[in-house]
């Protein structure tokens, strides 16, 4: 395996880890209040 292929694989791995970390961070920042609008009116739940 050439050195360039190794650099590309390491770079791709770093990008994947960064994207997964970003989505995990966004998931942790979500609001803990759930607001739903339905036939019976408005429902607000805290989690």
Image (cartoon, rainbow, N blue to C red):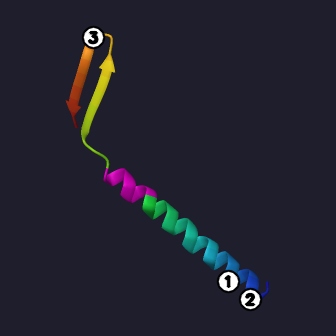
**Is-magenta flag for residue 8?**
no
State left or right for residue 31 relative to residue 1. Answer: left
Residue in the image at 31% along x and 25% along y: 36
What label does residue 17 carry, if any? Answer: none
Label 3 to label 2: alpha-carbon separation: 63 Å
How far across and down, in percent of the image, does residue 21 sit? Answer: 44, 63
- Label 1 SS: helix
Name the image quarter holding the C terminus: top left
Question: Of all residues shown, which one is farthest toward the right?
Answer: 1
Decide whether the magenta segment is chiefly helix, strand or loop.
helix
Residues 1 and 19: in front is: 19
Label 3 to label 1: alpha-carbon separation: 58 Å
How far across and down, in percent of the image, does residue 45 sit? Answer: 22, 30
What label does residue 40 carry, if any? Answer: 3
Quarter of the image holding residue 38? Answer: top left
Give the residue at mark 2.
3
Residues 29 and 37: in front is: 37
Give the residue at mark 1.
7
Residue in the image at 27% along x and 33% along y: 34
Q: Dot 1, how many residues are within 10 Å of its Cα: few (below 14), some (14-19), or many (20+)?
A: few
Mark 1 vs 2: CB contact within 8 A: yes
Q: Relative to residue 28, is residue 31 depicted above or below?
A: above
Residue in the image at 56% along x and 70% along y: 15
Quarter of the image holding residue 39? Answer: top left
Magenta segment boundaries in residue numbering:
23-29
Mark 3 or mark 2: which comes first in sequence? 2
Label 1 to label 2: alpha-carbon separation: 6 Å
**Is-magenta flag for residue 25?**
yes
């Amino acid at each position: 395996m050439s050195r360039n292929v190794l650099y590309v694989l390491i770079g791709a791995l770093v990008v994947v880890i960064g994207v997964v970390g970003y989505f995990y961070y966004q998931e942790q920042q979500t609001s803990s209040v759930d607001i739903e609008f339905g036939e019976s009116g408005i429902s607000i739940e805290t989690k």
